[in-house]
């Protein structure tokens, strides 16, 4: 009896399924003549045109200074975060200098690791 009910369920679902699965469908996809997505370059060009030639970076600085002069601490903090996260990453540099002792220690460690890897040290020790 259980098997008969299961067969009935399968038959009814098969009847409801379309003859063709997947593939193209009428009316699907982009319509002819539809425009491409907005690009960042186009957006910045449009903004510069509408602000009388003022660049986005200049607008950002003006807005930051305005928020600061108005005492809007929330906006000032957001501008600081924006500037620190986006601008400072490209300007940050880390310079590492090693002493003579550190350089010699690194050269020795590299030579030992290379000798173990190639087996040169084992051959030299056996001779």
Image (cartoon, grey):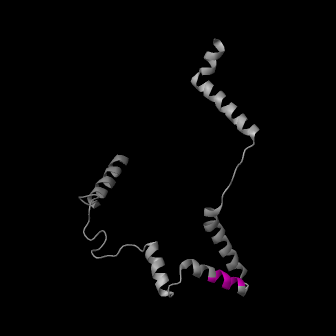
Hey, which quadrant is residue 28 in on the image? bottom left
Q: Is residue 44 magenta?
A: no
- Nearer to me, 55 or 2: 55
Q: Is residue 64 above or below residue 106?
A: below
Residue located at (27% from left, 74% from top): 32
Hey, which quadrant is residue 103 in on the image? top right
Name the magenta segment's main secondary structure: helix
Q: Is residue 32 left or right of residue 78?
A: left
Residue 29: x, y in percent?
A: 31, 68
Q: In the current view of this chain or complex, which residue is farthest to the front?
A: 100
- Nearer to me, 84 or 10: 84
Q: Is residue 30 left or right of residue 65?
A: left
Residue located at (46% from left, 77% from top): 43
Q: How many marks?
A: 0
- Nearer to me, 40 or 4: 40
Q: Give the magenta range.
A: 62-68
- Nearer to me, 31 or 68: 68
Q: Is residue 66 magenta?
A: yes
Residue 98: x, y in percent?
A: 73, 44
Residue 112: x, y in percent?
A: 66, 27
Q: Is residue 49 left or right of residue 119?
A: left
Residue located at (58% from left, 80% from top): 58
Q: Is residue 40 above or below residue 21?
A: below
Hey, which quadrant is residue 120 in on the image? top right
Residue located at (24% from left, 69% from top): 26
Residue 52: x, y in percent?
A: 50, 88
Q: Is residue 7 above or below residue 34?
A: above
């Amino acid at each position: 009896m259980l098997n008969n009910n299961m067969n009935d369920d399968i038959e009814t679902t098969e009847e409801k399924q379309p003859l063709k699965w997947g593939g193209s469908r009428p009316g699907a996809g982009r319509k002819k003549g539809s425009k491409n997505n907005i690009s960042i370059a186009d957006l910045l060009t449009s903004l510069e045109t509408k602000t009388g030639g003022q660049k986005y970076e200049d607008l950002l600085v003006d807005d930051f200074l305005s928020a600061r002069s108005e005492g809007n601490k929330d906006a000032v903090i957001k501008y600081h975060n924006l500037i620190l996260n986006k601008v400072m990453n490209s300007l940050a540099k880390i310079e590492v200098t090693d002493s003579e002792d550190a350089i010699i220690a690194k050269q020795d460690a590299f030579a030992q690791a290379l000798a173990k890897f190639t087996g040169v040290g084992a051959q030299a020790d056996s001779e």
